[in-house]
Amino acid sequence: MDEAATPPEPDEANRNEEYDVVAIAVTVTRTGGFAGLRRTWRAQPDPDAAPQWIALIDECPWDAANPARAIPPSGADRFVWHVDARCGDAEREAALADPEVEGPWRELIDAVRSAPRPPESAPRSPESAPRSPESAPRSPNPAPRSPDPATPRPPRD
């Protein structure tokens, strides 16, 4: 058998990089605020960025931010943050009041918010695509417009 045709076995140091790919996904959801809106960001970094993301995830105090605990009130119109991190088969979840988002939590949340958006799993159909105001369907019987108070009315007879 020709030995040149057989690829060499990777050494132990390279085996992890070449064969053990860890899928990482981090989702951050922010709720509350003035209008009570929900906003979600998601990061799915490439395998070559996995070590940096794993370090960000591991630095966070997950036990102190158990999502089942009661979130202490921190004032009106404050945000509540939910963080869900998946590294391979391991899953971690946290819930944080706005003042708790500092240090490693702030670094992880900021990294997720600034990460490139992951590709969508399925292409959007034209029906589910956002519409511009010009392309939105119009009602056959639109409501009458109220007169502008700044516009002078013609005199009545």
Image (cartoon, rainbow, N blue to C red):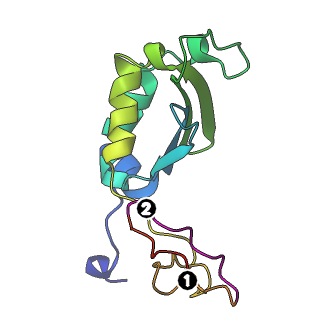
Q: Give the residue type at disc 2.
A: Pro
Q: Residue furthest front?
A: 157
As drawn, is 60 to the left or to the right of 104?
Answer: right
Taken as a whole, is the magenta stretch helix, strand or loop? loop
Describe the element under mark 1 as helix, strand or loop: loop
Q: Give the residue type at disc 1.
A: Ala
Q: Is residue 143 magenta?
A: yes
The spot of residue 36 in percent (x, y) is 58, 36
Q: Nearer the viewer, residue 77 or 13?
A: 77
Instruction: Name which residue lies at 37% across and 43% down.
Output: 113
Location of mark 1 (residue): 136
Q: Is residue 28 magenta?
A: no
Instruction: Tell which circle, 2 or 1, labels the residue nearer the N-terminal end.
Output: 2
The spot of residue 137 in percent (x, y) is 60, 86
Q: Nearer the viewer, residue 87 or 18?
A: 87
Location of mark 2 (residue): 118
Give how far apart the Cα atoms at labels 2 and 1 are.
Answer: 28 Å
Q: Which residues are magenta?
A: 141-150
Instruction: Name which residue lies at 35% across and 75% down.
Output: 6
The spot of residue 103 in percent (x, y) is 34, 16
Rendered view: 124 above or below 68 = below
